[in-house]
Amino acid sequence: MEKLVLNENELAQRWGISSKTLQRWRSEGRGPRFLKLSKRVIYPLDEIQHFESNALYESTWQKASDVILASDAKWLTPRQLATVMGLPMYTLTHPNVRKTLGIPHTKVGKLIRFNPEEVMAWARKWSEEAQANGATLSEDENRRTLLLTLAQLPG
């Protein structure tokens, strides 16, 4: 007869963790769903398998956050975007500069990723605002003005 539930110690042994970890997870609302019958805690096998299947990741950065990036979009790292746009790296990596400039980004745990379409829309808006303020600048002059503006930001 196949076993339909595991107790706390059996599950801890299956995953190679301490039963104290499972206890902490229950108090934090993490881990698989469980049944508590009097003082006995049991985990239905289908809940364990469901939890394990949801814990599968394709890359380590996915694990770093609850944010799931759309797989159809091309996400760029700060270095890639800085190279493409010709901007200094600190404009993309420094949180205060990103916030001040309003550069659209997605935070995935401790990592920052940029959707090129959103950033290009931001750059177009920035250029339009510069032109609305009376500036008639070429693309190269526009870039230099942005760099001068960035240099004057408080660090």
Image: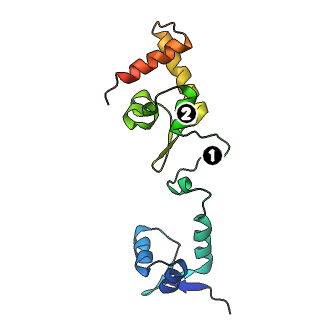
Kind of residue at disc 2: Leu
Is residue 58 left or right of 140 when viewed as pictured?
A: right
According to the picture, the residue beneath numbered tag 1 turns out to be 70
The C terminus: image quadrant: top left
Tags 1 and 2 touching, CB below 8 Å: no
According to the picture, the residue beneath numbered tag 2 turns out to be 81
Q: Position of residue 14 (x, y in %)?
A: 55, 81
The N terminus: image quadrant: bottom right
Q: Residues within 10 Å of mark 1 (few under 14, many from 20)?
A: few
Q: Residue at left 51%, top 83%?
A: 13
Kind of residue at disc 1: Ala
In the orientation shown, which residue stands out farthest toward the bottom?
Answer: 1
Occupied quadrant, residue 120? top right
Q: Position of residue 44 (x, y in %)?
A: 58, 80
In the orientation shown, which residue stands out farthest toward the left?
Answer: 154
Occupied quadrant, residue 38? bottom left
Q: Residue at left 61%, top 31%?
A: 117
Occupied quadrant, residue 56? bottom right
